[in-house]
Image (cartoon, rainbow, N blue to C red):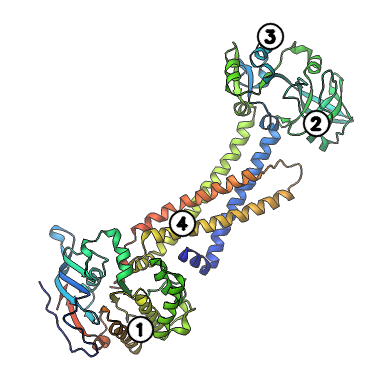
Amino acid sequence: MYLALRELRHHRLRSLLIGGIVTLIAFMVLMLTGLTRGLAHDNAALLIETPATHFVTTRDSGGVFTRSFLTPDTVTRLQAVAGAQATPLAQSFATLSHGDQQLSGVLMGVQPGSFMNPAAQQGQPLSAGSTGAVVDESLREDGVTLGDTLTLKPGGETLQVIGFTRAARLNHQPVVFVTLQHWQTLNPRLQGTVNTVALNAQGEAAALAAQLPGVTVHTRAAALQELPGYREEQGSLIMIQVFLIVVAAFVLAVFFYVLTLQKTPQFGLLKAIGASTRTLAGSLVAQMMVLSVLAVTVAALVTLGAAALLPAGLPFTLTAPTVLGASALLVAVAALSSLLSLGSIARVDPLIAIGAST
Amino acid sequence: MTASLHTQPTPAQPHPSPSNPPTLSLRAVSRTYGDGDGTVTALHPTTLDVRPGELVAVSGPSGSGKSTFLALAGALLQPSTGQVLIAGQDVTALPAAALPAFRLKQLGFVLQSSNLIPYLTVREQLTLVTHLTGQDAHAGRTRADALLRTLGLGDRAGHYPAALSGGQRQRVAVARALMNDPQLILADEPTASLDGPRGREVVQMLAQQVRERGRAAVMVTHDDRVLDLCDRVLHIVDGRLN
């Protein structure tokens, strides 16, 4: 640290420039992380924050809920295996009119007493025999308020909004929860089938459920990946982030490598005096760490500031653990990128310190 | 071939006593490069003793083997044959990994012009040595300031090398070489970038410190103007010292 800090301080402009590049890259990585998480939430908050651990679908559906139709018989057998840890869910897409506004949503039938029944943030949760709807809070932005009436198109059935819940989005649309019984009267064509059965169970019940004929049990994470468009959307954003991190690693590695090559005579002198390779390598790693920790810290603060300025409709989600995780990854990448220079420090021969001009 | 040592009258006291064990002892040391037909002998077998309190100059033209000689004496290069003893320790028997620590404790180097670390102040150039040996920072600072005062650099302690004259820089280099109180000081063309009076000043200072502290020093130079300040002058031509 003796040499590391003094050198950074003496070459202020150089330190600021490289620190600035790392800050900008870290800022981009953090912003993109926020957007990636935000889009994931906008797409499928329901599956990200659900208490369910597994979802059962028919084997031929490939895990896509809208392609899976479980008969009442199968549901009964699943519930016989898993008891209250299993609850059926039915899903259909709906167009709702609210005044002269047309809204899209996912109409979802849940059993009122089950663990999948959404908690109401405002208003009342669904209860047995209820004909109202608990809807996602994002509908508030469309002007929906408690007690409003939503009309299902084109049939004209009406649903009264009795409560708002959070984290209920699926396929980039707000979820409108109704009781399963009500859902089935609204969707008579489906003849009592449901799309999936959610399990809130560790290994054993899930393993037993998987033994039933014609069904597949998916973990929550696997079901999320099967959601149409989810993997593609996340994939492209994650690829950009990976590229940025690789670019950050290269910029740092090359920058410090060039500096190291330029400083070869200096390293020769220090080695002749008696500095060990370990001391000099430690000095370089310390510089890398000081620069990257400072740069990532600044980037994290700027990101948190920028997040507060983003328009409300932009899907952006960034939690402290995510920021810390991404920052730690960037610092680790910086540490790794010093390896390139460590080799050339080790190869410097103190002999070059003498007779340089002869 | 054994070098015959050409001794000049010693101008200063205390006179190195022949009974003192030598600080630097080269025993039939040679160095060759390459193998087979392409073998080049940089230094023919050389035997030399340098005793405490003695400043020995090694003078010769470019490419005569001066640098090889200094590298061997400074434990920077292992000889092809023979033994190098510094302060009683056979450095040819030390593992390569132990050499930096040995140099740090026993040797002081004064090198050519680009000799200082650009981002350290004059005082820090010196305290770097105590930092590397892991000694107490406060004691190092006190010692550095005392050395700088002795060498007339007391008012330059906070300056960076870029703000110093060439002569001042070489005096800082001498101070740094003395910082760890080494047994042996090795100087490589310390006057290379200096004019006559400045060069003499630096060598005079080096000679004075060597004698006062009872340390040994070897200076490689082709600057004839400073040879009279040395206790002995050896000439090296085509890798042969005499």
Q: Nearer the viewer, residue B48 or B35?
A: B48
Type of the residue with mark 2: Ala
Type of the residue with mark 4: Val
- Give the residue drawn at x 44%, y 80%: B145
Q: Is residue A231 above or below residue B45?
A: above
Q: Chain of mark 4?
A: A
From the image, state whether disc 1 or disc 3 is nearer to you: 3
Q: Can you identify the residue that label 1 sits on?
A: B194
How far is disc 1 from disc 2 in space, using C-alphas? 86 Å
* Residue A290, image x, y percentages: 53, 58
Q: At numbered mark 4, what does the secondary structure look like: helix, strand or loop?
A: helix
The number of callouts visible is 4
How far is disc 1 from disc 3 in space, using C-alphas? 100 Å
* Residue B65, image x, y percentages: 21, 72
Residue A31, which numbered label?
Answer: none
Q: Can you identify the residue that label 2 sits on?
A: A120
